Amino acid sequence: MWEKHNSRYRFIRYIIGMPKSRLLKRILPILSILIGWSTLVVTLSRNNLAGNFFSIPMIPLSLMSTFVAALLTLRSNQGLSRLNEARIAWGRNLLLTRDTAQLLATYIYPANTKAGLLTG
């Protein structure tokens, strides 16, 4: 399993499997509306079909982008902290398992071979 996850072709496998993604199915309606709206705005502004009536002020966009960037940073930090906690827990589990195996190999196996093999 780890070899498959650690493969250099992982990104290609994710791109190919994207149509089956539950996340994509959840965000596809909103994403398609935003793409359609953006296409409409760009088409109207480039062809000058809206005239002077259709202009987009940049101040609200710049203010909103600052808040969105801060929100994304906080969400990324939360995800990374959860990942770090999981790595620490996995490391503790691994150390405990090694200590237990070492104790069994040191004390139980030399005294009683059958019991040592049954505990492993």
Image (spheres, rainbow, N blue to C red):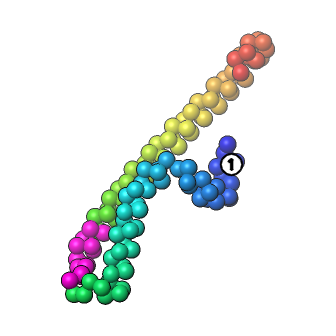
Residue 74 visible here: yes
Toward the viewer: 71 or 35? 35
Q: Which three-letter amino acid code belongs to the residue tagged 1? A: Lys
* Residue denoted by label 1: 4
**What residue is at 22 percent from the left and 87 percent from the top?**
52
Q: Position of residue 104 (x, y in %)?
A: 69, 21
Above or below, 49 relative to 63:
below
- The magenta stretch spans which residues? 53-65
Q: Position of residue 78 (x, y in %)?
A: 39, 50
Toward the viewer: 20 or 67? 20
**What residue is at 67 percent from the left and 42 percent from the top?**
1
Toward the viewer: 87 or 19? 19
Quadrant assignment for the C terminus: top right
Q: Quadrant of residue 77?
A: bottom left
Q: Quadrant of residue 91?
A: top right
Determine crowd level at label 1: few under 14, some 14-19, many 20+ residues with C-alpha closer than 10 A: few
Above or below, 23 relative to 67:
above
